[in-house]
Image (cartoon, rainbow, N blue to C red):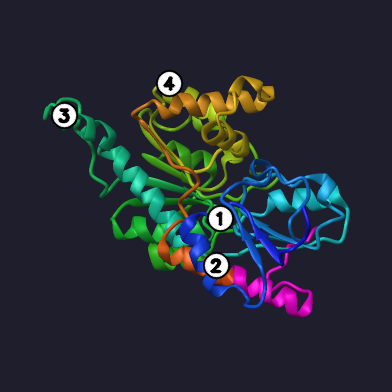
Amino acid sequence: MKNNYSAVFYEAFEEEENILREVLPKGHKYLFTWKTIQESGHKSPPAKIISTRTQSKFPLEWRDKLDAIITRSTGYDHVSDYLRKARTGISAAYLPEYAARAVAEQALMMWTALLRNLTLQRKSFETFYRDGLTGCEIRNRRITVIGVGKIGTELVDIAHGLQMKILGVDLKPKPEMKRKYGLHYVSLKEGLENADIAVCALPLTDITRGMLDYKTLKSMPSGSIFINVGRGEVAPSGDLLKLLEKGIFGGIGLDVYDFEKDLASVLRDGKNASKLKPEARKSVSAVLKLMKDSRAILTPHNAFNTAESVERKSLRTAENLASYLKTGKFLTPITIQ
């Protein structure tokens, strides 16, 4: 495929594409597709600058054909991993913060729906029976926010407004959070043991990968709710399924998944899960079981997706691209240690 485009945008859904077309630097030709790189069938990059979200797999054979990568996401481990393997001078950028409030509100939506048995309520409308539908009020529920960064801070703000009892878990406690919200920082162990609801808002690092596994989360009270809007690799899907099946969890809300690229291929493209590598197969199979459970709410990595955040994301993408086209440098570059 000839490089007839200034940049190609993978994983661009309709609303995002519409805004990008308005705000991207003029006088250039762009290609948009909702597909990931691997779904597109592209054997070589259609442009020397490519932009993705988090589900695309970057082919190593593209490393000498690319000048730059822009990931339209706050997390960028998928890009940094590729750059380490590629060992070339590809420039890269990410979007530091554009959707913290949106992501926090997605978590709120999930724990509210789970506390009030919304899935069962909707089904029971067909018969208008109320048996088994009794839920819980939010006020005075104990919530532990794991990772009090930008998203975690928004979670604390929301929970405080709802008069919940809030605990925070973070390596770097912020004194201002205690002053403003009365937030009490505790260890992960104490936070989990005293949570009716635990929300993971952690980034993916070498430390957090697999941190919230079965052994760690089983200390939560029976019937508690677990929400993950951070990174899927922090809390293995197979472990979460086991915790739900054993009744330790009364509900699960997930917007992120370990082996998310493989999960998307199975759900979107009809790829046979049995053909995945063992670890991926175990994870995807667990998610497929959770899909059928009324105690689980699963969304397609969509927590960021509000009109406000998509506009912010598109503008910051355009600003980064404009800077690179003019100076050869990004405004928010990814640096590899």
Q: Nearer the viewer, residue 311 or 42?
A: 42
| Residue at the image position 36 percent from the left and 58 percent from the top | 158
Among numbered discs 2 and 3, the one appearing first in the sequence: 2
Query: Which stretch appears magenta?
Result: 317-337
Q: Marks 1 and 3, how far apart in space?
A: 37 Å
Q: What is the crowding at mark 4: few (fewer than 14 residues within 10 Å), some, or many (at least 20)?
A: few
Q: Marks 4 and 2, how far apart in space?
A: 43 Å
Residue under label 2:
20
Residue under label 3:
126
Q: Quadrant of residue 331?
A: bottom right
Asked if residue 331 lies in the magenta stretch, the reply is yes
Residue under label 4:
245
| Residue 22 horizontal side relative to residue 77, left or right | left
Q: Is the residue under label 3 in contact with that under label 1 (CB below 8 Å)?
A: no
Three-letter code for the amino acid on which mark 4 is drawn: Glu
Q: Marks 2 and 1, how far apart in space?
A: 9 Å
Residue under label 1:
12
- In this rendering, does residue 59 appear at all? yes
Asked if residue 22 lies in the magenta stretch, the reply is no
Q: Marks 4 and 3, how far apart in space?
A: 27 Å
Three-letter code for the amino acid on which mark 3 is drawn: Glu
Q: Nearer the viewer, residue 225 or 55?
A: 55
